[in-house]
Amino acid sequence: MTTIDLAMVGNGMFGALVDQRGRFVWCCLDTFDGDPVFNCLVNNNSDKTGFYDVILDDCEYASQVYETSSTVLITTLSSSGGDEVEIRDFVPRFVNFDRVFHPFQLFRTIKRTKGDPRITVRIRPTFHYNSTDGYQTRGSQHVRFCGPKHTWRVTTNMPIRRIHEELPFLLSDDPVIIVFGSDESFTNSLRSVASEFEHKTCHYWKQWCKSLALPVEFQEVVMRSAMTLAMLQSEDGGGILTTISMGLPLGPLAPSSRDSRVCRLLDECLALPVLRELGLLDVCRKFLTFAKEICYQDEQPQHTYNSWSDCQSKKREWAPYLAGYRGMGEVYSGGSLLEDLPQGIQEEEKSWYHSAVIYGLLAITLVHAFFDIRISPELCTPKLCEKLEHFAHEACEAFSHRCRLFSQSVCADVDEAGRSCLPRGAGFFDDDAFFFRNDEQEQVGGTEQPQPGRGAVHTLTSVLCWAAADRMHRIAMLYLRDAAKASIWQKKAMSMHQEICKHAWNSQRGAFTTFWGGERVSPSVLRLVELGFLSAEDARFRGTLRAFEVDADAAAVCVGVFDGDLPVEGHDVPIAVSQTAVFTSNTLLWYCEALRSTGATAQARQLLEAILRCSRHRGMLPEAIDLRSGDLWGNFPYTP
């Protein structure tokens, strides 16, 4: 059966996903969000088109590991007769002539390690989302796959007929080298080039890992996560891709997910403090440059950007020739998060979430550039200060306007029938699965969401407004040395803090709720400590954490009947309640961090180890995880 437990190779220009048997099941070569030449992952694992694999006769067993401190993927295939083949896959990335070399090429080396293995190499790319196979031309040592817009070349050191006609052959002592990528010829020995590129790529990543500030525990996990993050950071723009795949459902009962091959500001901006703690200074610098570029663009800042830092403007489009993951639902490419909000959501709602979320995120992100002397000379200018001050003013104005609306029409987060009544903007914070799915009718669990009332205030959105004012106070005090301006921003921040505490705190539940005046506690409020709004020692945050554990079933993106044991030892992690199945990786990791920060280290460790056990490559997570079965769901890999 097809699985999302995959491996990734990439270099910051593109990425590819490989299954346990060494089959490329997903790859967009021209850009992260381009046309997938290998796409069988979302085409019911088709054995006809959209993949690239090596078939070993009588294959019985496959294993897969990454080379230590490297992105080189090693797959071993073993037959029932004792034959064994090693496949080494990598995408070049190394420093050459004082710049990073990252070509659009997949390198594959196939070696005989035992017996007399007989293999078949099958390379079957498609074009325009599997609508056509294009046509082929061949030379003495290469095959060209030609489509409507792109042409890809396969170059090898073995007889080209074995690839062109998919002929089985015995693997000799000489390794088989196959390069799939841009339509460029090699002027040197292919074996020498492959060996040199692999050596330099390994050396690059090993040196890169030496700069990491690793914790005492989980070092391999942190290194693998950090390297995956680096592979997902676009070399074109500096933004970090949420994922490289699309259309993978969030659970067994869910429709296909949206195209998430974009840079989402929320996921990236709030992660910067963690990246700095891990020593990922270059990753932070590139992202801050990306955020500064957004500030200076003519267009109004957006929540999502493509891999080359342009606003995500591609319209959602049905891919009729892709059958979906395991045949589950139609697949769509493109589409922004706010392009098709349901009727009833007015421009006022969009403006509120835009001003509060986007401006608040940019303000709290770029403040990092002002307090790191390794970055500030490059990024900090008086004009940038003016931009951030403008953004903070916009966030504060949006906050004040929303407060007036709220006072006129108090809104809770449930309607008279007790159904969830969340504004769609909450999807930015994993509180509403609408933004992850392509359906517009019902919740995965079967309950339709009514539209929110006018004036609803999402708590974390309001906290982002406060954070913008708070960060401007810090910049004015410590960087500008302007006491008067610092005092003004401090007063604004204090006033906003009091207003949020007044309306978002539910004394009956002893918790901050998802919406002002509401009852429900959703995953987003677990980030109040991360933003500095509360201290981890604050009794109010501990109460909020306990209330979230009670409401955890509502945080699941796919629900079902509990019929088995949890993979969490001891069964004492409260989030794993009986009616829930699949949670987003964001929710699980935020909850895990909230447990750790409040002193529940044993529970936090149990949950983290349960999450890590779900994936074959520890440190690479999908968009969602079923805690009952350990199944992985959603797009992969995901950068929560």
Image (cartoon, grey):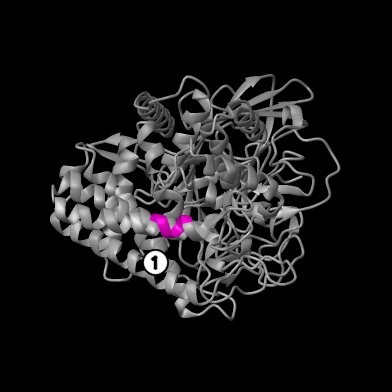
Q: Is residue 588 left or right of residue 69?
A: right
Which span of residues is magenta-colored? 497-501
Q: Mark 1 highlights which residue?
A: 399
Give the vertical position of 419 relative to 364 (above or below).
Answer: below
Q: Is residue 498 magenta?
A: yes
Q: Main secondary structure of the magenta part?
A: helix
Q: Is residue 465 magenta?
A: no
Relative to the observer, which residue lies in front, 150 or 453? Answer: 453
Q: Is residue 537 left or right of residue 375?
A: right
Residue visible at 29% across and 63% down? 391
Q: Position of residue 438 (x, y in %)?
A: 63, 66
Residue 33 visible in the shown view: no
Q: Position of residue 76 (x, y in %)?
A: 64, 27
Q: Is residue 481 left or right of residue 248?
A: left
Q: Position of residue 81 (x, y in %)?
A: 78, 22
Relative to the observer, which residue lies in front, 56 or 334? Answer: 334
Screen quadrant of the N terminus: top right
